[in-house]
Image (cartoon, rainbow, N blue to C red):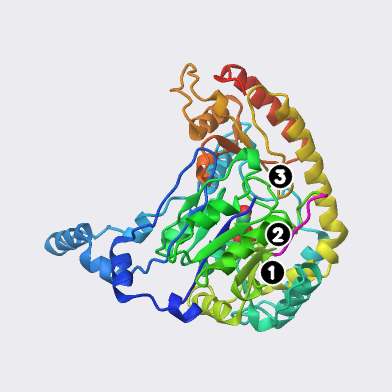
Amino acid sequence: MAAAASYSIQPTSRIVNQPQPKSALNSRSLSFASQFQTFSLNVALLLISLSIFRVDRCVQLHPQKASALVRAEMSSEVDVSLSPRVNSVKLSKTVAITDQATALVQAGVPVIRLAAGEPDFNTPIPIAEAGINAIREGFTRYTPNAGTLELRTAICHKLKEENGISYTPDQILVSNGAKQSILQAVLAVIIPALFWVSYPEMARLAGANPVILPTSISENFLLDPKVLESSLTEKSRLLILCSPSNPTGSVYPRKLLEQIAEIVAKHPRLLVMSDEIYEHIIYAPATHTCFASLPGMWDRTLTVNGFSKAFAMSGWRLGYLAGPKNFVSACGKIQSQSTSGASSISQKAAVAALGLGYAGGEAVADMVKAFRERRDVLVKSFGELDGVKISEPQGAFYLFLDFSSYYGSEVDGFSVINGSEALCRYLLDKAQGALVPGDAFGDDTCIRISYAESLSTLQEAVERIKSALVALKPAVAV
Ligand SMILES: Cc1ncc(COP(=O)(O)O)c(C=O)c1O
């Protein structure tokens, strides 16, 4: 699946030389009015229009904040009010559920954790050793804000060889994970459904309005170019694409990306952020297409990638952005005022990861083979279950299953199972399986199952889920 977003760290006019009329900027800054917001049962695409939000102004104008300050002044109470911007952001559901499942396991409950988005494999030995050597050799100090030249050069080489796009090291920004890369890049966004859980919240943090566009399981959750075209306005700033997709595992075929690129090309203000963190976890015959490599897209695309998934390096916290220099420098400015450069040790390890060969060589191919086997087993097992709709994932390590035919049931001790959140609560209780409700990704009909677990654990989880579902007869035939 993919998600796209456009962004900008700078005011729009500095990026595309298209200054906004003053009145438009003022009204956006005060009201955050979104152009439109479409929710559909099955999908979503978030369209975030540029919205310039001034915290200082908000603090002055926000009445609750003002009264909290008065109270604080009069009674010396601590002012505990928070900024409207942070209040508009939701906690990540994947993080919340994973933490809850971990707490249950620590309390002795045998919960199977299928909620987290991280490989169950250890970091391949040559990568881990490069990190250990970095410590032994005293490579433990600050590195340049943008990352070591060695790593940025290796990333340029990888992008040229594997993705067919050319960058120089000053067009690469290494960060503490792809998540940081994305946050730094997001200001105004369009996200085609289904979206990774953090995109809309990051857009809100950036003061932008996310707009969700519909996709459907029958179309493998792929964005219909016509829907994109009819949704774009002159305020649309960033299209976020994610292929292979979290949460659906869909992979955008090259032809579809070319159609999307043609539409993007008609909108001078529209930029693209292409999140390609799952590019190597892909199942033939599906193939990965790097969006920036499509005709005319290089100078308006920011490519995000990282080491957490394909190289099983989630704890090393390393990701990167590649794009035109003005955007990358703007992101670098933010990074210089927040985290500075990423871990020196992780950067040495990442150089070793990129040295494993094309697409991560044998080490990555072995992990992908295991993921594929698990996918096949799960698709078959869930396919045997009444009332479940499946779109077979072509990449990543998630299944996004439509369980909506089970909604409407009532079970002892539970209120009506009226959506994905209620179903996940029920399955956590009855099957002791931690899954993520689809509503966290913009689709309440589905739940996400991460198959980054051993085959035997997954088989056990499927049996438990099937038994728990017996009490919830599908309300509608599928
Ligand atoms: C689509 C997508 N992008 C980015 C990230 C963030 O990865 P990192 O661990 O590099 O911050 C994730 C992690 O789950 C993801 O699924």
Residues under labels 1 and 3: Cα distance?
22 Å
- Label 3 or label 2, whichever comes before in sequence order: 2
Q: How many neighbours does mark 2 have within 10 angstroms: few (below 14), some (14-19), or many (20 or more)?
A: many
Determine whether 13 is above or below 89 in the image.
Answer: below
Q: Amino acid at mark 2?
A: Met
Residue position for label 1: 346
Q: Position of residue 354 (x, y in %)?
A: 79, 69
Residue located at (53% from left, 41% from top): 443
Q: Position of residue 368 (x, y in %)?
A: 80, 50
Q: Position of residue 278 (x, y in %)?
A: 70, 56
Residue located at (75% from left, 31% from top): 459
Mark 1 touches mark 2? (CB < 8 Å): yes
Q: How many neighbours does mark 3 have within 10 angstroms: few (below 14), some (14-19), or many (20 or more)?
A: many
SS for callout 3: loop
Determine whether 168 is above or below 128 in the image.
Answer: below
SS for callout 1: helix
Q: What span is colored magenta in the figure?
A: 284-290
Nearer to us: label 1 or label 3 = 3
Q: Main secondary structure of the magenta part?
A: loop
Q: Tag on residue 313? A: 2
Residue position for label 3: 452
Residue located at (56% from left, 31% from top): 428
Mark 1 touches mark 3? (CB < 8 Å): no
Q: Amino acid at mark 3?
A: Ala
- Which residue appears farthest toward the right when viewing the image? 362
Residue located at (54% from left, 34% from top): 445
- Label 1 or label 3, whichever comes before in sequence order: 1
Residues under labels 3 and 2: Cα distance?
13 Å
Camera sees residue 292: yes
Horizontal relation, residue 58 to residue 350: left or right: left
Q: Is residue 365 magenta?
A: no
SS for callout 2: loop
